Amino acid sequence: MLCKDMIQLFKLLLNYNQQISTFMQNNKKIIHIDMDYFYAQIEEKDNPYLSDKPFAIGSTNPHRGVLCTSNYIARKFGVKSAMSTSVALRKCPDLILLNTDMKKYKEVSIVLQKIFLSYTHIVEPLSLDEAYLDVTDVQLYSNSATYIAKAIRDDILEKTGLTASAGIAPNKLLAKISSDMNKPNGQYVIKPDEIDSFVKQLSVKKLFGVGRVTHEKLLAMSIETCEDLQKIPLEILTNKFGKYGYSLYNYCRGIDDREVQHERTRKSVGVENTYQQDLQNFDEWIEKLSDLYDKLKARITDEYSSRIIGIFVKVTDNNFTKTSLTKQASTVDLPTLKLLCEELYSKQTLPIRLLGIGVRLGSVDKSQMVLF
Ligand code: TTP
Ligand code: CA
């Protein structure tokens, strides 16, 4: 009897805790800003003749090049980011190819960061063209996140000549999903009382962390929408997906308590991938490493780059055991990451399902604080 009472009490506490956390997170105002066809839009601004033609940015080598992005005209032909140049040319023979100019894109990104920081210091850059902003306590525009987002987009257009899209919601998960809703050059708001109806019809594919493998697993369980996923008990999700099962349980209800991690308090920046097929040998590790390295470089803003104190490589083997290796460093480069991989590989006895790399960050020093 006593034991039953205890369980009942525990359930009540859990429910109360969940309600408090839902209430707290629903009080937040998060904006996700995402530039439209970023590298391509910059090139189009500098070369207006491109505006009515299909074009892409990336390696122009038709034999072994890969594309970074394309304009929306090219996308109509099926041309996509990360597609090989040869496939893209087959889909769209008139495609115009331009080389990347990372220096130029980084310069624009610095202007964007400055604009964001003029509204709030709680800014989490995700890449050169994307960031989360927590504007819960911003008093501008009577604290209307919708108007703040519009003002930021207007500012971006005025200072860079480029359009951006925005998502406004009570948490990061929903803000990111909504920035895609009215793209390009638009914004979309999800208010706290709209969360339920919004997520119910949402495809599970849109949830943070659902890649191809997880999506296939969910489809095999006849789960297509968040409403389908909401019917699955937590125990089943944690059995199938481990710790991520908890996140899935919350995400499909529109619950996400991840904080916007601003640059000054962030301790690390990393990228990782879980592979559909386990990586069996060192060559496979190295092949995937280059991809991850490109993604990591795009996430390391100048502010982060000046604070690097270490680099790390981490893996999860096919028995779900996690191992990582960190080395002191003030910069990140591919050869050093390869050496770290080599060392980690020599200790590894099983094939791995996840490979990740990243940098550890030190605190902001006083000279930098002045800049803020
Ligand atoms: P995205 O925001 O994914 O794409 P985008 O800005 O080009 O287009 P969208 O309007 O759909 O947001 O990526 C931002 C930039 O990052 C993109 O312009 C080029 C670069 N990038 C790569 O280099 N490789 C990739 O695989 C992807 C997805 C992006
Ligand atoms: Ca973008």
Image (spheres, rainbow, N blue to C red):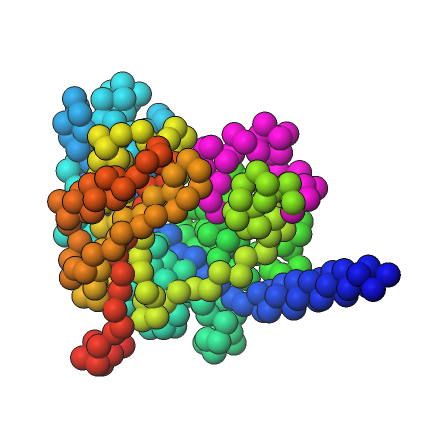
Residue 22 image-quadrant placement: bottom right
Task: Where is residue 333? Give x, y as percent.
Answer: 15, 49
The answer to whether residue 96 is above or below residue 131 is above
Task: Judge whether residue 206 is colored magenta.
Answer: no
The answer to whether residue 64 is above or below residue 371 is above
The answer to whether residue 174 is above or below residue 147 is above
Question: Closest to the observer: 29 or 2?
Answer: 2
The answer to whether residue 48 is above or below residue 307 is above
Residue 116 image-quadrant placement: bottom left
Quarter of the N terminus within the rendering:
bottom right
Asked if residue 16 lies left or right of residue 331, the reply is right
Task: Where is residue 323? Give x, y as percent.
Answer: 34, 48
What residue appears at the point 34 percent right and 66 percent down from the top-left corner? 266
What residue appears at the point 15 percent right and 38 percent down from the top-left corner? 99
Asked if residue 68 lies left or right of residue 169, the reply is left
Residue range highlighted in magenta: 208-234
Task: Where is residue 254? Give x, y as percent.
Answer: 59, 53
Question: Closest to the observer: 299 or 290?
Answer: 290
Task: Where is residue 372? Give x, y as percent.
Answer: 27, 77
Q: How many marks?
A: 0
What residue appears at the point 27 percent right and 52 percent down from the top-left corner? 325
Q: Is residue 152 visible?
A: no
Question: Closest to the observer: 80 or 330?
Answer: 330
Asked if residue 35 lies left or right of residue 110, the reply is right
Asked if residue 272 lies left or right of residue 191, the reply is left
Q: Is residue 121 visible?
A: yes
What residue appears at the point 54 percent right and 41 percent down from the top-left corner? 241
Task: Judge whether residue 226 is colored magenta.
Answer: yes
